[in-house]
Amino acid sequence: MTDLLQLLVSGLASGSIYGALALAIVFVFRSTGVVNFSQGELAMISTFVTLGLYKAGAPLVIAIIGSMVISFVLGAAIERVLIRPVQGRSEHAPSIITLGLFLGLSGIAGWIWGLDPETFPGMFPERSLEVGSVRLSYTSLGIIAVLLATVAVLYVFFERTRLGLMMKAAASNPATSRLAGVPVSRLLMCGWGVASAVGALAGALIAQSVYVSPSMMVAVIIYALAAAALGGLSSPVGAVVGGWIIGVAEAVVSDRVGFIGGDLKIVVPLVIIFAVLLVKPTGLFGAKEVSRV
Amino acid sequence: MNVSTLLAHRSTLVAVVAIVVLAIVPFQLGPYDNGRITIIFVFAIAILGLNLIAGYTGQLSVAQSFFLGIGGYGSALLLDRVGVPSLLCIPLSGLLCLIVGGLIAIPVLRLRGFYLMVVTLALTFLLSPLLKRFPELTGGAEGLSVSTPTPLGGLYDDQWIYLVSLVVAAILFWAARNLVRSQYGPAMIAIREREIVAEAVGVDASRIKTQAFAIASMYAGIAGSLYVFAIGYASPDSFGMHLGLLLFAGAFIGGIATIPGAIIGAAFVQLVPQYASNINDSFTSVIFGAAIILAVRFFPDGLAGLGRDAIARFRRKPADAPGHPTSTIPAAGSAVREATPRKERASS
Amino acid sequence: MTLLDVQGLSAGYGDVGVLHDLDFQIADGGVVALLGPNGAGKTTLLKSLSGLLSRRSGRAELEGDDLMSMHPEATARHGMAHVPEGRGTLTDLSVEDNLRVGGYLRSSSEVQETMKVCFDYFPVLADRRTQQAGNLSGGEQQMLAISRGLMLRPRLMLLDEPSLGLAPNLTRQLFAALGQINHEQSVAMLIVEQNASLALDLASTAYVLESGRIVLAGTADDIKGDTSLRKAYLGY
């Protein structure tokens, strides 16, 4: 039995990882109205790119920024080439394409980089802070701090900038936005690009506790999707809070509920997402959703 | 006799000939090839179920592998622990999944679209740790070995399970075809196209969705049962997300709202990985990923739709043979497009 | 002076032709009513002018610029504001944000200025500026949609059934505001409307569309004054 406070902190740290990827999912949904099931696999590719740049001699920070730029281009290209042609065809066609990408990208990564796990350089000092009986590792604190900074930037972007407003408009009603002169198609590409860049950052955070391999995101993506859904899919703050709820619940349940333990903790996001969506189908922070006739 | 009954008889004739030919095959091939074809039948049953729920009813579930696992383990346990005769295990597994699927459907199908996909995807992650949690019952990570049913009339094991799978698949395909042609078919499609409108004209959407999900689960359960008999063991990691996504991909490749598409999709799911792994272990995922994307974009009715169009063009007849309603991916079609002539006429 | 000049416009969806060989003009600052039964192709006409519908042929020029090659973004840049049927507001954004989106092509000082103008015409929007557009009443949403178009500072507004679903007195208020906007902002208007008498009061010219063809054209006064024409084409 671990101290409850300790559980809380480690839960927040792993929750922050889910939240980071959920942020990328929310960003795509918010700016294009599509749920990207391949967000995790895209972030995995980004993480390999970061690692490649780092191994080529770039300092870690530069490698991450470089990977974010490359990921922006990759994400924008995917939107333009694969998503746009089927957008508007049906409600689900783009999401099904992203399920195809989920498979395809993991295959491509395995093909290029092989299946053997690799270690990712640490971003934070390998020490801990002792507060009373609780040990806080700098890695956990660093992950939480980077996530909070990211969500703050995204919040300001959406709520305070013109570009953010136009992205929301383009996602909300493309036709009306175009009639106002808003370059919707360029903004949709941009939305995928920014989301992929956020995913690259999330990948680096996730790689602090997971080996880099083509399957590194397979488990994380479910938690991230659950966090995004919990937060209502369109709220960056909701994504982070959703991630934390799932992270903490997972940590507490797997420590305190013997039957679940470490093996069955996948039940936690499943139960939470069920409970929340059945009570409040738009998530905790979601806007009102109107059924389309 | 009018054209449509002629066409109906023609497709029945084709089906009978195909079954007869397929029934001769196991006596010409070795155990290895027979086993491979048996798995195609098995996957075809599972994909057919998926077509009913995802293709016709428009409820995108990725969880078909979960029910394959439930059916497979159910059969293994019924046979080895309870001593139920093997042939009886197959329908009992179907019944088990019908009940489990129906129970899961009640809450799950209140979720729409994306949420449904997330929850069903999560289900595929759940099965393996759940099975490993009860090792004394399920054999844990080792899995269970399943004794092959005793063949009748001096057949070899592989021939026997091949023929059983063929017969079961034939029955289930016939049942699905009849289901789609009954008044149930249009009701399912109406739910896919516009659920609110369907309810407005008196379709009990939640009942039909739940029933379709339960039936799809039953198909998966029967497939899972045949699968463990054919393979000879049940392993917890055989029925995870990967198989779920491959079956989902197979359904789209074959044609998500078609009956014959299930066979094509199953052949794809069974055969492609074997050849692809000669190139690279990861190549299977690349092919399946690309295939989903291409299918959604260029041939929404899958390979079955392409073939149907080709035949129709060859015969210079419209491509609307009964029982295979021309369709697109779920919720697609003119009804949801921003502006259609029909809508225009009604509202301008 | 002619603002919009349309010659031989045809349009449709897929293989289905909806509009056939239309000719009409809108004068600078003029108001044209487009009348006719459901399904005549009125909405299609607006969509093919603003670029929402790309299957079209013929000639349509706005101050000499060819509209037929333009996307909606480009027609907006050329000063055309299409207020689509069913209001077309951004329901999950606030009233103010809706107006900001409408002013995408304008500088921020112009946006501030035009927003004030909109609030003068529709004071209720000022009271609701922070509310989500989706929570507004039908009439308020229509006012917002018109204001959103106005934010473009357009030369020409295409209005698709502004009175749809509104109570009669609200409709009269709305049309009074439209008349004021036309007058004070020198915006030309092409109004599709079921309420023919109201539209004819506002418009100077009217066209009646039936099955995608113009079957009657004339000044609003002529049509209003001729009972037999009204009975035959407009049913009142």
Image (spheres, helix red, strand yellow):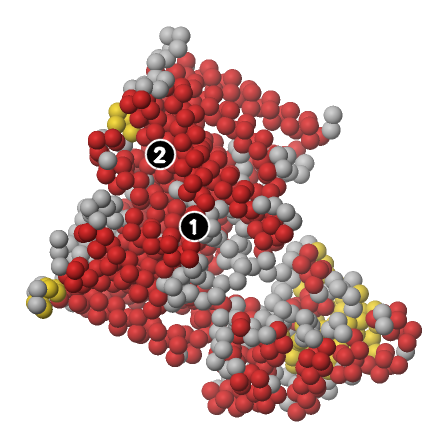
**Is residue B271 something one can see in this rendering?**
no
Seen in the picture, residue B343 relative to B109 is either above or below; the reply is: below
Question: Mark on residue B116?
Answer: 1
Seen in the picture, residue B196 relative to B276 is either above or below; the reply is: below
Seen in the picture, residue A36 relative to B37 is either above or below; the reply is: below
Relative side of A78 to B185, left or right: left
Residue ID at (31%, 40%): B127
Pointers 1 and 2 within a single chain = yes
Residue ID at (56%, 73%): C89
Relative side of A56 to B92, left or right: left
Please, what is the three-letter code of the amino acid marked with disc 1? Leu
Dots 1 and 2: beta carbons under 8 Å? Answer: no
Estimate the spatial distance between the alpha carbons at disc 1 and disc 2, rounded to whole Å. Answer: 20 Å
Q: Nearer the viewer, residue C114 or C92?
A: C92
Q: Name the element at disc 1.
A: helix
Chain of the residue that carries numbered disc 1 in the rendered image? B
Q: Which residue is mark 2?
A: B70
Indicate the quadrant where residue C183 lies: bottom right
Q: Name the element at disc 2.
A: helix
Residue ID at (76%, 78%): C199
Indicate the quadrant where residue A204 lies: bottom left
Relative side of B177 to A48, left or right: right
Quarter of the figure with the C terminus of chain A: bottom right
Q: Nearer the viewer, residue C235 or C186?
A: C235
Chain of the residue that carries numbered disc 2 in the rendered image? B
Q: Of marks 1 and 2, which one's residue comes earlier in the chain?
A: 2
